[in-house]
């Protein structure tokens, strides 16, 4: 707790905060990082294997193989979420499953499953993008900023 907030507490509250902090279990940060790295790397390796399969067996190019690869990863993530498997993987792996596109698919599918009892329109349709909506908005805004920077660099380079 910051010292500024700590000053607003009574001595008894400060004593309790110190007591609670001393007994708080230490988080295994290194272990969590390794798990996230392994899980995220495994998902990305599976994606790379899928892309290579599409290139080799279905005559896609490197550019065009990306779309079916992402689609397969999304479908698998949604199915694993529906069967309750993805939650167990995510609980073990932490952020490693949240970063790739599978994490986005999981967030949309989880919200849809959670609100299905409220109906398809108001429940599923109205709530499935609550968490994912901020990701979409941030992604669109980030793409806009990167495009403006790229245009600016091109304009300065052309002078």
Image (cartoon, rainbow, N blue to C red):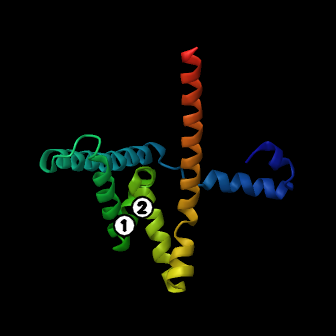
Q: Which residue is drawn at 45% across and 54% down?
A: 98
- Residue 105 numbered mark, or none: 2
| Residue 145: quadrant of the picture | top right
Tell me whether the residue at label 2 lies in contact with that at label 1, contact meaning CB atoms closer than 8 angstroms: yes
Q: Where is residue 97 in the image (x, y as percent from the top left)?
A: 40, 54
Q: What element carries label 2?
A: helix
Q: Can you say which quadrant of the picture contains the C terminus?
A: top right
- In the picture of the structure, the residue carrying the numbered disc 1 is 78
Q: Earlier in the sequence, mark 2 or mark 1?
A: 1
Relative horizontal placement of residue 77, taking residue 141 as reference (left or right)? left
Q: In this view, does 122 lie above or below 131?
A: below
In this view of the protein, which residue sits in the foreground, 6 or 52?
52
- Residue 102 numbered mark, or none: none
In this view of the protein, which residue sits in the foreground, 51 or 31?
51
- 10 Å crowding of disc 2: few (<14), some (14-19), many (20+): many
CA gap between label 2 and label 1 equals 6 Å
Q: In this view, does 79 lie above or below 118?
A: above
| Residue 89: quadrant of the picture | bottom left
């Amino acid at each position: 707790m910051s010292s500024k907030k700590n000053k607003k507490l009574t001595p008894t509250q400060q004593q309790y905060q110190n007591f609670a902090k001393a007994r708080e279990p230490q988080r295994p940060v290194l272990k969590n990082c390794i798990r996230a790295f392994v899980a995220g790397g495994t998902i990305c390796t599976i994606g790379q294997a899928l892309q290579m399969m599409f290139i080799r067996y279905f005559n896609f190019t490197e550019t065009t193989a990306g779309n079916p690869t992402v689609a397969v990863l999304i479908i698998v993530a949604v199915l694993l979420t529906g069967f309750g498997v993805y939650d167990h993987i995510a609980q073990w792996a932490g952020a490693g499953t949240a970063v790739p596109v599978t994490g986005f698919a999981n967030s949309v599918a989880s919200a849809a499953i959670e609100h299905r009892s409220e109906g398809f329109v108001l429940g599923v349709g109205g709530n499935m993008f609550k968490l994912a909506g901020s990701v979409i908005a941030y992604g669109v805004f980030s793409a806009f900023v990167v495009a403006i920077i790229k245009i600016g660099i091109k304009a300065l380079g052309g002078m």
